[in-house]
Amino acid sequence: MTRVEELTVGELAARSGVPASALRFYERQGLIHSRRTTGNQRRYSGGTLRRVAFIRASQSVGLPLSAIGEVLALVPADHTPTREFWVRASACWSERLNERIERMERTRDRFTECVGCGCLSFERCALVDPGGLVT
């Protein structure tokens, strides 16, 4: 009998909108956790929905799974991230997100210049070779 507070991988996928294959990947990466039934089926706590929502929201702003995992590692596997946790994580990532925004703005500006120039030269184009690695 399935416990009321637990979800199968299919139920978690349906409720979160995340494919079961992605949920299994998240589990292999240690981002979410399940227990196994005697039949070796996964069962997720209801709080896993919140972890999945946190992962998806974090990914939507461009944070890599490695960074998300570092923060989720601070929350015990059997605990649901709270609002206070989200606020602390957001504060930690503000600087990283601001740097990403600045990088994207610079790339946008360079792209506009490159489209106007049209050269896309490996030797001269700051967009094609931003670090000046091509000689």
Image (cartoon, rainbow, N blue to C red):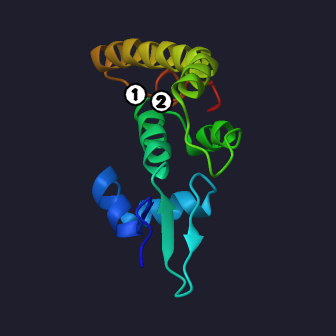
Front-lying residue, 121 or 109: 109
Is disc 1 surrounded by few (<14), some (14 to 19) or many (20+) residues within 10 Å?
some
Q: Which residue is mark 1?
A: 120
Q: Is residue 6 above or below residue 91?
A: below
Is disc 2 surrounded by few (<14), some (14 to 19) or many (20+) residues within 10 Å?
some
x and y, in percent, of residue 124 in the image: 51, 21
Image point (59%, 59%), residue name: 33
Residue 118 left/right relative to 105? left
Image point (53%, 57%), residue name: 26
Q: Amino acid at mark 2?
A: Val
Front-lying residue, 107 or 33: 33
Q: Is residue 17 visible?
A: no
Q: Which residue is mark 2?
A: 128
Front-lying residue, 20 or 65: 20
Instruction: Report the mark closest to the observer, 1 or 2.
Output: 2
Image point (53%, 20%), residue name: 97
Q: Are marks 1 and 2 in contact (CB under 8 Å)?
A: yes
Front-lying residue, 1 or 125: 1
x and y, in percent, of residue 43 in the image: 49, 68
State the mark number for residue 131.
Answer: none
Residue 44 left/right relative to 20? right
Q: CA distance from mark 1 to mark 2?
A: 6 Å
Label 2 residue SS: loop
